Structure formats: structure tokens, C-alpha cells
Amino acid sequence: MSRDYELLQADFERIKSQNQQLSLLNNTTDKSLIFLSNVVQIDFAKYQVTLLSHTVEDRPDLGEAVEEIFKYSLVSSDSKIDIVLRFRNNHFSLYQIAIFEGFPPYAPNYVQSTLSDIVQVTQDLIDRYKSVDSETYLEEFSRALSSVNETNNEVTLGNTKLRITISGDNAEVVLMYTANGFDFAAKSLRLVFQNHALQEISDDWFLYRIGSTQVNVSKEEAIQIAENAAKDFEWNASGVQVSDFNVLNEPVSALFFPHPRTEPLTLVPYWYITLYLDREYPGGVRSITVGVWADTGEVANIQALSGRVLT
């Protein structure tokens, strides 16, 4: 009887703790818990939830955006999960989970059962996201999702591009801004699934603005501009000025990745060129990177790339 009493007491304490957490969640105004409960729909009744940390800081590199980061620990009888939530200017920006203990399928416990249809799972999540945030791009996400299927995993509607990549039990769903055939990847909403579980949501669509969509410099022209700039380039490695080096014709990398020029968070078309050298030079340098503004053709920056700090 004594053993039975101890088990009943343990169950009582567990249920009492769960009820206290559910009562807290039902009455909370904490945006992080609301997001986890209403959008991600984690079943808090099955976890002991602990707020590990809550930090707030200004981000001068992001136009003085106020950034809040919440870190939670979720512990159940068979799993331990850490969750990170980020808000920028009071707007959701990032959700990530890290599973330290658990059994297959290594997924959190959700209020509703997970589905194998990635499009339907994403649509349901976006619908719930819209219930806590009324951004117009979420409506565009829904419209794009209704146009994709098993044979057509990329859809462009106006300035919105949706791309779904599925590999086994893993998937990535990305909504990004696009214009004139070029993607502005920084302005995007991204969902990552691993082993059928939602691993990450990142939303920076709301954060960035589009300053220009005019691309006057082609990929080939940007490479030529970078190669010309490299001819007069030099760097200092431990007091040694390096100016005599050879740039290979191939390989060469040209990445279109718009980013701010004069106004924070305002994206301008930009080419990021990587030129590879024929060998390793002082400072461990094996490549030179050149940024070229795609609207003007001006060189934004040039630097030697290595694993060491160069001056």
C-alpha cells in the first residue's frame, strides 16, 4: 500500500504541475508562449516547461532593431528539448528546436498529429501564423501553396516565389521576394523539417525593404569587374604586403545576394564574387572576394579570404 501511495502521489504531483502550466498558458500574454502554443502547437501538457533565459538588446547592424531571445527547456518522461524563439521589433523572427534526448521519430509532442503531406502541414502552420499576425505576405504564401503539387515544387506569383525541396524525411519550404528573374533571398520566410518534425522557422520578410530591383550588371560583367579590381589589390599578412599573386580563370563563384548599401535593412542588387588563387599565399589566403553593386557596377568591397585575421 505504501508503494501504491507513492505512485499515486507522484501521479498527482505530475498532473498538478501540468494543470498549473496549462492554466498559465491559457491566461498568458507572453508572445513566446502564445507562438509555441498557437502556431507550433506543442502539447505543453506533456512537458515540464522552464524558461532558461530571456534577453533583450538593440541591433545597430539591423537598423537599431530591438531583438528579444527566449530560450526554453521542455522535459518529459522520454525526451528533453531546448527551444529558441527570437522576436525583432516585437515581430516573430525565429523558432529553432534542439532535441537532446528522445526516441524515434525524434519529434516534439504536438496537440495535433503530424501529417506526411508537407504542403498540407505548411498550409496549416501558415494559417495558424496568420491568426497571430496579419502580414499580407502570409496570404501570398497561402496562395502559392495552393498552386504547388508533386511535379511542380516551385511557383512564382508576382514578386513572390515559393520553393519546396524534399529529400527523404527532410524538407525545406522557402518563400522569398523575387523581381526581374532575380531572388532577394534575405527577404524570406523559411521552414525546415527534419524527420517529419518542424526544426526551424525563420522569418525576415517583414524586416527587409526593397530599395531597388534594377539589375544592370550581368553575372559575366560582375566577374570581369571583380577580376579587374583584383589586379590592383593587395593585403597585409603579419607585416608582409602581398601584391604578387595569380587569379585562376576557373573556378569562379558569382552569387546574387542583395543587401543594404546606405540605408539599413533596405536591399539593393549585389553580386558576391569569389576569385580563387593558384595556391596558398601569406596569411593562408587562397581566394579573394569582391562585392559588386548590380545596379551601378561599382565595387562595394574587396578582401582576401582565409581562416586567419588579416590587416
Image (cartoon, rainbow, N blue to C red):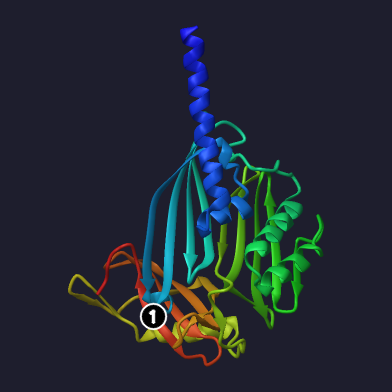
Decide which of 24, 132 is in the foreground and name it.
Answer: 24
Label 1: how many Cα within 10 Å (few below 14, some 14–19, many 20+): some
- Count of residue discs: 1
Residue 272, image x and y in percent? 49, 76
Residue assigned mark 1: 302
Identify which residue, 279 or 185, lies in the foreground. Answer: 185
Q: Position of residue 12 (x, y in %)?
A: 52, 25
Most extreme residue toward the left is 239
Q: Which residue corresponds to the image point at 53% horizontal and 64% vertical from the top-left?
A: 93
Say which residue appears at 51% left-offset and 32% top-offset: 16
Q: Residue at x 48, y 28 (%)?
A: 13
- Is residue 188 shown left or right of residue 90? right
Q: Is residue 244 above or below residue 152?
A: below
Can residue 79 be seen here? Answer: no
| Horizontal and vertical percent position of residue 71 | 43, 51
Q: Quadrant of residue 172?
A: bottom right
SS at badge 1: strand
Task: Indicate whether 298 appears above or below 88.
Answer: below
